[in-house]
């Protein structure tokens, strides 16, 4: 059954409603699963503890309990806060995440939009979260928050560049900015004439993949780049003054963004919904594709959280040095090499 | 040479003044940041008022007293055995070590010496409380620079030592086990074997921390060259313990003590004092890690060599200390801790001056924090390693 | 088999030989006597008292005017580079130190005649520490003598030869001022703030004497002996003999 055909028989508002529902579910369910699997369990085992065990079997309903707790809490505004900015900031951050998920395809037809400029759009909307974090930092009227917000801004600007430059290598090799087409390009590609596995770009764009992961870690403000949050210095930085529902939105935003960025990375470097042996445009992939994507997301986010809970954090100047003096030149060199090879072959 | 002036520091201050003049023209102003008293990195209730220019500290002023309990005054109205209950709470991570110098000072005044077995067990517990204390530092330092996981390992493995302390003394945190003239009880059966197992685990923990934290490039980038204490300045501020040995000063009261060390047997053991020439945060961490290993080594020797005999010397039931003055210092987990006990021959001390390690160690912070970045404040505070009870007393 | 030397940064480590354990030689009374001689030569009349506790420690009392010069000489002339601590003692026989649950002993006694006071002072358990400023009991300073109510005392170490010395000085009871040690030992800063706050002794030349522990508006000087510890005045403190009554005994007492 072709999903677009099904949608075509519905009115526009009905289609939109379905898309919004699926979008919400795909972000929130994935984020919830990641929180449970990584934050609650995997990390607990790394730190030789059990993690939540009481709520539900093996603690699986802990997240619901947390959500319930946060919803019940009072929504506190600091006295001198810029009330509108303070209140709006979590929505801006969350909006950026939801806009980013729009461009990610999960199957030949399981996609929200099929834009020729997909990855371009995705990277553009992902930067909106900087605005939200700066708003939170400024609006809280707290010095720690302000420092956190400023750090976040400087950091996100610095790491936006290597992120984009890493993607450029992929775009050059695939010859398209359409996310779905990038998946097809990987599925149909071949390495030195051997095409059974396709050509996931992690193999040819390995350098870009590593740069993308590092820059992604910084975009997400996870350790070793968590200076904007930095519990031991800035007392969670821009989130210091938030409580209840609004804090929960930041919390969800953090994990949802991790999931969505992992989805983008798996589309760009791991072949998206493609698995060797099944044609990427077969109808069955509309059902299998999201599952394949989920597996890849889980693997990538595990990397993210593994790093996060192991590494100490950089200092702000060291982080800038890493971005400008190392990652960006490396990414540029990668582009040059990719371009030359693209022309040669 | 007579006064402590650091040229670099002065140069920095004058440069700051020049900057400030420029800043006046373009109308920027500094920001005062209150770190603490409820800040996660201040181990309790230390407060640091930092004047910032951007993220750089222009001046830092520590404010203490949020936990001042007046032990010096309270000691004057308690009998000698009762005082140990109070001073247990000074450095609450290595409580037993707090009791030892006070008891030794009282013994010195009374001219009582604990029997050999009591001295060996005393040294044993003294070193175990060092491990219980410093192990937490090793995990905590990693948290200060942002790595969350090591502190869980520290708490997990500290448990082995705390269990042994509890088995021997009955108290995990505040043993109150040391007595004038000996110890409260003898060791329980099977304790020696269990403790040896625990020491093996502590050594494994040290290796784990070394691999996980010390070898990490980011950790080194965050700690090397940060918070450098030159040896002469460290001495004039009275830094002690790993803070001064991290600056290359080879001085350990356990080996080089001047007063009243009749009650501890460190001099009969085979161990060494570690120093590191750099004087930065990393070297302080490094020295502490080595000291934990050295302590486990000492404990193994102590366990093998405990002499038999009584654990209590003959002391009167009501303890009256003859008139006199005594100062005894020992190398406690946080540094040199000493008690200046003045007795007028009564049941209670006339005056007890508590020389605690963290008070001196922290007095260098206004000097040390000038000119660093905000994240380095946390690194430096973490590496100087203070316990609030030890500052405020 | 103890694997201790497992270093990640061996290249920065100086090989430090563990000095021989015979540090006792650094600590004999002969060494202490030599220290005393050196100080006497330098300070002359300013050194007003000394005490060598056999085999343990040395205490030297200097004139308050020479307090700062003594520090400078100790640091530069004798190698005592390590600042240990600085504090003060109030030698006033104190209120509130009667440990025998006879809380109001001294208050009672204040009402009695001096003669009765003197006989009461003979009582071994009751009069150990009791008495107050107006009683006939004289102030009695400790090691190295003294003739004022307040004394500042400080201790410095030599970390190379492992010597240590305690220095005392009488504080003038009217001005309550001694020179500051901060220009010599920077670490004296906080210790002098504490001594100022707790005893009201002023340190001339200190860069900023302000409260360190107590709130800024605090009145009084808590470690002075005439600053009563009210809790102890109101309720007797038990426990000289560390024996607890059996529950039945308790009940009988209550009944």
Image: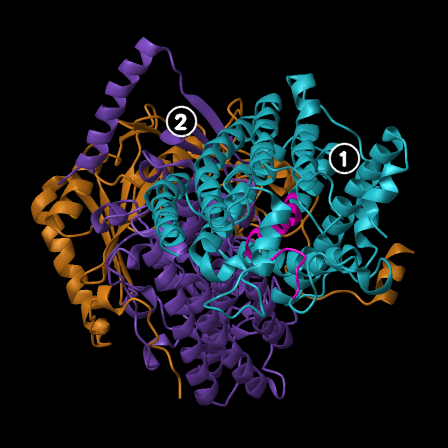
Chain colours: A cyan, B purple, C orange
**Mark 2 surroundings within 10 Å by alpha-carbon count, few (fewer than 14), some (14 through 19), many (20 or more):** some
Mark number, residue A244: 1
What segment is highlighted magenta in the picture?
A257-275
Which part of the image, by quadrant, shows the N terminus of chain C? Answer: bottom left
Q: Can the viewer see residue B385?
A: yes
Which part of the image, by quadrant, shows the C terminus of chain C? Answer: bottom right
Name the residue carrying label 2: B54
Q: Residue furthest left?
A: C41
- Residue B288 in the image, given as x and y percentages of width and height: 39, 63
Does A60 appear above or below A247?
A: below
Q: Does the magenta segment cover residue A259?
A: yes
Considering depth in this image, is B107 or A158 the residue closer to the camera? A158
- Residue A217 in the image, given as x and y percentages of width and height: 53, 48
- The answer for how far apart the CA atoms under marks 1 and 2 are is 31 Å
User: C80 left or right of B285?
Assistant: left
Q: Can the viewer see residue C224?
A: no
**Mark 1 surroundings within 10 Å by alpha-carbon count, few (fewer than 14), some (14 through 19), many (20 or more):** some
Does A68 appear above or below C176?
A: below
Query: Which residue sits at x=60%, y=24%?
Result: A135
- Residue A125 in the image, given as x and y percentages of width and height: 60, 32
Kind of element beneath mark 1? helix
Does C17 appear above or below A227?
A: below
Considering depth in this image, is C104 or B135 the residue closer to the camera? B135
């Amino acid at each position: 059954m072709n999903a677009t055909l099904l949608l075509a028989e519905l009115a526009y508002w009905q289609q939109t409603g379905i898309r919004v529902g699926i979008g919400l579910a795909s972000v929130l369910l994935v984020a919830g699963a990641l929180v449970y699997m990584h934050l609650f369990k995997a990390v607990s085992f790394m730190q030789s503890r059990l993690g939540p065990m009481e709520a539900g079997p093996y603690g699986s309903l802990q997240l619901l309990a947390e959500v319930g707790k946060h919803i019940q809490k009072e929504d506190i505004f600091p006295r001198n806060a810029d009330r509108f900015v303070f209140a709006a900031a979590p929505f801006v951050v969350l909006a950026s995440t939801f806009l980013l998920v729009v461009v990610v395809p999960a199957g030949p037809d399981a996609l929200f939009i099929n834009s020729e400029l997909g990855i371009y759009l995705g990277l553009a909307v992902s930067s909106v979260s900087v605005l939200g974090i700066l708003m939170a930092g400024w609006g809280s009227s707290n010095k720690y928050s302000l420092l956190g917000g400023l750090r976040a801004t400087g950091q996100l600007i610095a790491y936006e560049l290597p992120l984009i430059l890493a993607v450029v290598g992929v775009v050059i090799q695939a010859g398209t900015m359409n996310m779905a087409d990038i998946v097809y390009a990987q599925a149909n590609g071949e390495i030195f004439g051997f095409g059974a596995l396709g050509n996931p770009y992690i193999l040819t764009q390995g350098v870009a993949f590593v740069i993308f992961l590092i820059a992604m870690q910084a975009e997400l403000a996870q350790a070793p780049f968590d200076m904007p949050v930095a519990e031991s210095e800035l007392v969670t930085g821009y989130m210091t003054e938030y409580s209840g529902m609004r804090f929960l939105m930041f919390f969800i935003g953090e994990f949802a963004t991790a999931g969505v960025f992992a989805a983008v990375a798996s589309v760009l470097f791991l072949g998206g919904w493609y698995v060797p042996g099944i044609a990427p445009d077969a109808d069955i992939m509309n059902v299998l594709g999201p599952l394949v994507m989920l597996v890849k997301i889980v693997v990538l986010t595990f990397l993210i959280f593994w790093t996060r809970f192991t590494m100490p954090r950089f200092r702000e100047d060291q982080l800038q040095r890493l971005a400008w003096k190392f990652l960006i030149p490396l990414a540029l060199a990668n582009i040059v090499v990719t371009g030359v090879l693209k022309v040669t072959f | 040479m007579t006064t402590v002036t650091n040229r670099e520091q002065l140069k920095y201050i004058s440069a700051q003044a020049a900057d400030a003049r420029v800043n006046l023209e373009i109308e920027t102003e500094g920001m005062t940041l209150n770190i603490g008293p409820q800040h996660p990195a201040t181990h309790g209730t230390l407060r640091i008022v930092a004047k910032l220019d951007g993220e750089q500290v222009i001046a830092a002023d520590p404010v203490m007293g949020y936990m001042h309990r007046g032990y010096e005054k309270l000691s004057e109205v308690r009998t000698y055995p009762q005082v140990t209950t109070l001073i247990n709470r000074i450095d609450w991570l290595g409580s037993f070590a707090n009791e030892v110098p006070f008891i030794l000072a009282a013994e010195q005044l009374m001219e009582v010496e604990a029997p050999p077995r009591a001295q060996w067990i005393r040294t044993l517990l003294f070193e175990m409380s060092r491990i219980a204390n410093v192990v937490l530092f090793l995990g905590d330092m990693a948290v200060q620079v942002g790595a969350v996981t090591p502190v869980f390992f520290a708490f997990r493995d500290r448990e082995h030592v705390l269990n042994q302390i509890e088995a021997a003394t009955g108290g995990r945190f505040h043993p109150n086990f040391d007595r004038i003239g000996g110890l409260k009880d003898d060791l329980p059966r099977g304790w020696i074997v269990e403790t040896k197992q625990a020491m093996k685990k502590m050594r494994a923990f040290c290796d784990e921390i070394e691999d996980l934290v010390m070898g990490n490039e980011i950790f080194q980038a965050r700690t090397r060259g940060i918070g450098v204490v030159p040896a002469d300045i460290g001495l004039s501020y009275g830094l002690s313990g790993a803070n001064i040995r991290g600056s290359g000063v080879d001085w350990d009261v356990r080996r080089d003590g001047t007063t009243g060390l009749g009650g501890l047997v460190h001099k009969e053991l085979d161990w060494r004092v570690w120093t590191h020439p750099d004087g930065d945060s990393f070297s302080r961490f490094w020295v502490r890690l080595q000291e934990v290993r050295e302590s486990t080594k000492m404990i193994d020797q102590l366990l093998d060599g405990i002499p038999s005999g009584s654990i209590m010397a003959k002391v009167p039931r009501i303890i009256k200390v003859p008139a006199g003055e005594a100062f005894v210092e020992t190398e406690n987990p946080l540094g040199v801790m000493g008690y200046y006990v003045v007795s007028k021959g009564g049941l209670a001390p006339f005056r007890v001056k508590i020389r605690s390690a963290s008070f001196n160690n922290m007095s260098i912070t206004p000097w040390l924090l000038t000119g660093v970045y905000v994240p380095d404040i946390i690194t430096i505070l973490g590496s100087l390693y203070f316990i609030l009870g030890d500052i405020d007393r | 088999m103890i694997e201790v030397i497992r270093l990640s940064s061996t290249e920065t480590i100086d090989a430090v030989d563990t000095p021989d354990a015979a540090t006792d030689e650094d600590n004999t009374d002969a060494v202490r006597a030599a220290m005393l001689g050196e100080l006497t030569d330098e300070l002359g009349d300013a050194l007003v008292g000394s005490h060598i506790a056999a085999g343990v420690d040395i205490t030297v009392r200097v004139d308050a005017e020479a307090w700062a010069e003594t520090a400078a000489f100790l640091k530069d002339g004798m190698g005592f580079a390590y600042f240990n601590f600085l504090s003060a003692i109030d030698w006033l026989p104190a209120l509130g130190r009667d440990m025998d649950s006879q809380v109001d002993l001294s208050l009672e006694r204040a009402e009695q005649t001096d003669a009765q006071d003197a006989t009461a002072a003979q009582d071994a358990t009751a009069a150990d520490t009791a008495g107050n400023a107006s009683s006939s009991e004289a102030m009695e300073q400790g090691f190295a003598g003294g003739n004022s109510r307040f004394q500042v005392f400080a201790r410095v170490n030599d970390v190379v030869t492992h010597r240590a010395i305690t220095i005392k000085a009488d504080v003038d009871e009217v001005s309550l001022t001694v020179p500051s040690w901060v220009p010599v030992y920077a670490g004296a800063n906080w210790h002098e703030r504490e001594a100022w706050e707790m005893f009201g002794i002023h340190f001339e030349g200190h860069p900023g004497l302000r409260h360190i522990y107590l709130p800024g508006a605090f009145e009084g000087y808590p470690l002075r002996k005439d600053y009563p510890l009210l809790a102890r005045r109101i309720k007797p403190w038990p426990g000289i003999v560390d024996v607890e009554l059996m529950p039945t005994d308790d009940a009988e007492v209550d009944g």
